[in-house]
Image: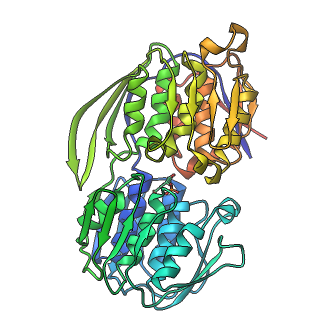
Amino acid sequence: MAKKTISPGGSVSGVVELPGDKSISHRYAILAGLAEGASEIRNYSPAADCASTLECLRRLGIAVDAKGEHVRIAGKGLDGLKAPRRTIDAENSGSTIRMMSGVLAGQSFTSTITGDSSLRRRPMRRVVEPLRQMGADIRSTNGNRAPLEIRGGKLHGIDYTTPVPSAQVKSAILLAGLYADGVTTVRESVRTRDHTELALREFGANVAVAKGEISIEPRPKLQPRQSIVPGDLSSAVFLIGAALVLPESSLMLHNVGLNPTRSRVLDFLISIGASINLASVQLRDGELIGDVSVRHAVLAGGSISGAQVAEMIDELPMLAALGPFTEKGIEIHDAQELRVKESDRIATLAEGLRQMGARVEEFPDGLRVEGRAGSSAATKLRGARVNPQGDHRIAMALAVAALGAEGDTVIKDFECVGVSFPDFFKTLERLRGGENQDDLRK
Ligand code: S3P
């Protein structure tokens, strides 16, 4: 397993075209598979998670032709999927298993879907429960976790209030709602990303959205589409983080997804002093996109809690890693969901940042990372050997912190970044002028 050594210092500057958004790529692929005819998706995410979704579709008899980031999918309509001969494998992807479970619940065949050891530990009850209420027979020998055996069938529409804020759960129910015998409604008390609602409409489904309430009419004829996936803001934030840590940095990120249910991280960064500007903001395929420019700035620090958390859930590791570079530090609450992501992100972050000399207080629902004002000069971050526990976003967050530490940091199993942003280290290296980076192989 490979390690990556990050030497600190320098600056990042240049122009970046981000790979396609991971969340949107999953949704376009699934809906293309259910549409009546051939769809084309450009700038499809190169993330391993999105390849997992394509592989699941193939196992269900859908022809998928993926040439780099250009994907063609020959949809066969809502009832065109075939019973898989083998277990379907979502690998590390929570979005894949949860959303595909919604689709599988509507099929007239039985299928089993599983994932890697991380995914098999993650909670699935949140999706199994509402799908059972809709009429699917879902069995697990692993305490409502994967592998899930799904006997799909005649589903009825339900009116369901999600107990945890989760776009994946909302999406699974809406996708199952395509197969129901009446309208399906999902209510959420905290807003989560709305890519499924937007994509369903683009593919021709009838979706009504009122405050906190999303309803879908069953059995639409989904139309194939040609779509372009916006750049992934959740990947972009790690490069933005690098620019905020390294003095004299300046980046321009093109065609980044700026959906308001995702861009709260930019509002937060601006509110604590980041110099971030948006330009050429426009709507494409129902999604807001634009160019984001960022310059190095001194950050005040601040706290995140309540409804902000769901809209920044994937950016919290990077924000926590910025803590030591702010004046007052970063404090996060109401984020217990971080404990059931690809790793226990609160514990993994706390351990990694502490190893680098940060002062971190861990709470059941978050953490506090001291800023400069709370530490003596002697507690400036220092390079360390850190273990992201196979979690892509932790590896990238610790890499950002490493840029501002004293001495080299060695990140174990750095290839896990491939789950969302395979070219992260290559891009970072290019923006730093190719200096200070090397691979060490065991
Ligand atoms: C996602 C939703 C979020 C997020 C994940 C992607 C999605 O998960 O953390 O990376 O694409 O819908 P939850 O729905 O579990 O909050």
Q: Position of residue 89 (x, y in %)?
A: 59, 71
Q: Quadrant of residue 184?
A: bottom left
Residue farthest to the top? Answer: 377
Q: Quadrant of residue 17?
A: top left
Q: Is residue 389 above or below residue 210?
A: above
Identify the residue at image location x=65%, y=19%.
Answer: 405
Q: Position of residue 191 (x, y in %)?
A: 39, 52
Q: Is residue 322 above or below residue 391?
A: above
Identify the residue at image location x=43%, y=83%.
Answer: 106
Front-lying residue, 196 or 16: 196
* Residue 126 visible in the snapshot: yes
Left or right of 109? Residue 346 is right
Q: Position of residue 126 (x, y in %)?
A: 55, 67
Left or right of 107? Residue 392 is right
Left or right of 349? Residue 255 is left
Q: Position of residue 102 (x, y in %)?
A: 46, 75
